[in-house]
Image (spheres, grey):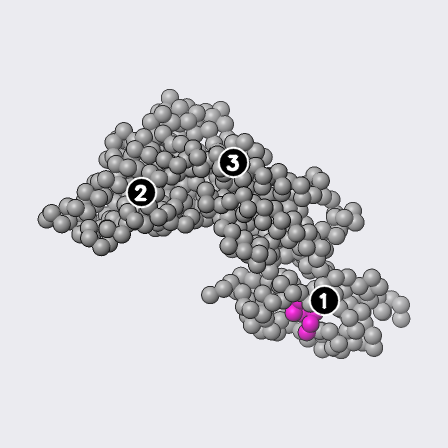
Amino acid sequence: MALYSEKVMDHFRHPRNVGTIEDADGIGEVGNAKCGDIMKIYLKIKDERVEDVKFETFGCGSAIASSSMATEMIKGKPLTEVLTLTNKAVTEALDGLPTHKLHCSVLAEQAIQAAVKDYQAKNKAVG
Amino acid sequence: MIYADNAATTQMSQKAMEAMLPCMQTVWGNPSSLYAFGQKAAEALADAREKVATCLNAADPGEIYFTSGGSEADNQAILSVAQNGAKQGKKHIISTAFEHHAVLHTLQKLAREGFEIELLPVHEKGMITPEQVVAAIRKDTALVTAMYANNEIGSILPIGEIGAVCRERGVLFHTDAVQAAGHLPLDVQRENIDLLSLSGHKFHGPKGVGVLYAKKGVPLMNLIEGGAQERGKRAGTENVPAIVGMAAALSEAVANMAADTQKLLAMRGRLIAGLAKIPHSALNGDSDRRLPGNVSFCFEGIEGESLLLLLDDRGICASSGSACTSGSLDPSHVLLAIGRPHEVAHGSLRLSLGADNTEEDVDKILAAVPEVVTYLRSISPLWKDKLNGKRPFLLPE
């Protein structure tokens, strides 16, 4: 059996939403270089919905695949729904991850939460 | 497929397979059986023992013990000397910081049992000196165990010199020669080696079989109790086909060593020169004193597992010392021991060539690796931060 599911490999080989958003409304970065995983999520928000999302990831295959899948799952979604995204949902959407790779999906969840919170904090400051 | 992971395992040689077949088809008796049919298997075993003894220049084939592999040989060597040393009040063992886990974890077990384990630092090139060993030896030192050549970064330790200083001081010396056997000339007598471990599948022999060389007079303890096989030191019916295959593979590797080494050095040189052109990369280990087939690099800003997966997509089999490939949270202890920061150690790549690799393989690797590194850097926020000056570069351009 392969280490990763076909879906993980597909998202790893052909990651969706890779890149940056220059005038992002919210940016979330989690992980650290020492541990070998950094995820950065950029959000463009319109009418409290994710109009666009991009990511950059330094990490292993499952970290890149988790970022890609998580961005797909939140694109176009209202923020209220985005905030309910769990690592479990990301893992399930990837048809599972090896046990020692589950933290990659946790990072994806945390990066998105951080980006939304960044947006909300900025918005509050402006408002 | 380009197989560049010969330090992990090797393809079995035709000669090894041919040597094994009769042990399964016609000479399949039990070497311990009295009748002539069994004794034919015993003869095959004796022949294999002689071949291995010759390859190591052991004084007597009776100093060769067949085991299930390098790990068992390491365990038996270290635990034997430790048990015997403890009887004489010697509970100090010297080793190096970058040994294989078969050695390190055995030493950690002994540490929990009250032994004092001293791991010598291996400096940035992955090397220890005989002077370090001399300085560390005490009256209660039972054993010095130092690997012949490192499995990740390929550096070759001055084993003959270390053996000499140990012998002069009456301290037993073990070397884990798993990466060296069949690739470097070994001579247990000239190098003053008391105990040596090797593994069959690292030189085109079968898996699950290895050797412990123990110089006559070095007391061995049993890891496996039972019958009187291996002069009572390793119970269990011998794996005759594997042992015979291993001996054939080792003889072949030793016979071809000079020609293979020349070919490997040419390919290694091109790979190192080519990969060094990647900005913010660094060769791990010593540039000269290294295994002929070993190429080990760190690339800043990327993670090793992603690199391996994308190389796999391009038909290249390699390995890495990143945490994600080590199955733990920390990257390779070898890369940390030579002073690579965690972040850099995560971005490591080991290519280990065999004599079956070709210059065309080298061309393809040299085309693929820079392309994959560049791509992974392009999606890495860490790399971007370095380019923007938000984080420092850790490896020179």
Determine the chain carrying the residue at label 3: B
Pick the residue in front: B189 or A6: A6
Please indicate whether residue B155 sits to the left or right of residue B339 in the image: left
How far across and down, in percent of the image, does residue B142 sit? 37, 32
- Name the residue at 25% across, 31% down: B60
Find out whether residue A71 is within the magenta segment.
yes
Cα separation, mark 1 vs mark 2, equals 54 Å
Q: Are marks 2 and 3 on the same chain?
A: yes
Query: Which residue is label 1 attached to?
Result: A17
Q: Residue furthest left?
A: B35
Give the quarter of the image for residue B78.
Answer: top left
- Name the residue at 30% across, 37% down: B52
Pick the residue in front: B111 or B321: B321
- Name the residue at 48% across, 34% down: B262
Query: Which residue is label 2 attached to?
Result: B248
Disc 3 and disc 1 in contact, CB within 8 angstroms: no
Residue type at the position of mark 2: Ala
Cα separation, mark 3 vs mark 1, equals 43 Å
Query: Which residue is label 3 attached to?
Result: B265
How far across and down, in percent of the image, does residue A50 sit? 77, 73
Pick the residue in front: B117 or B278: B278
Q: Which residues are magenta?
A: A68-73
Residue type at the position of mark 1: Asn
Where does the C terminus of chain A fall, quadrant-wise? bottom right
Residue B170 appears in the picture as rendered: yes
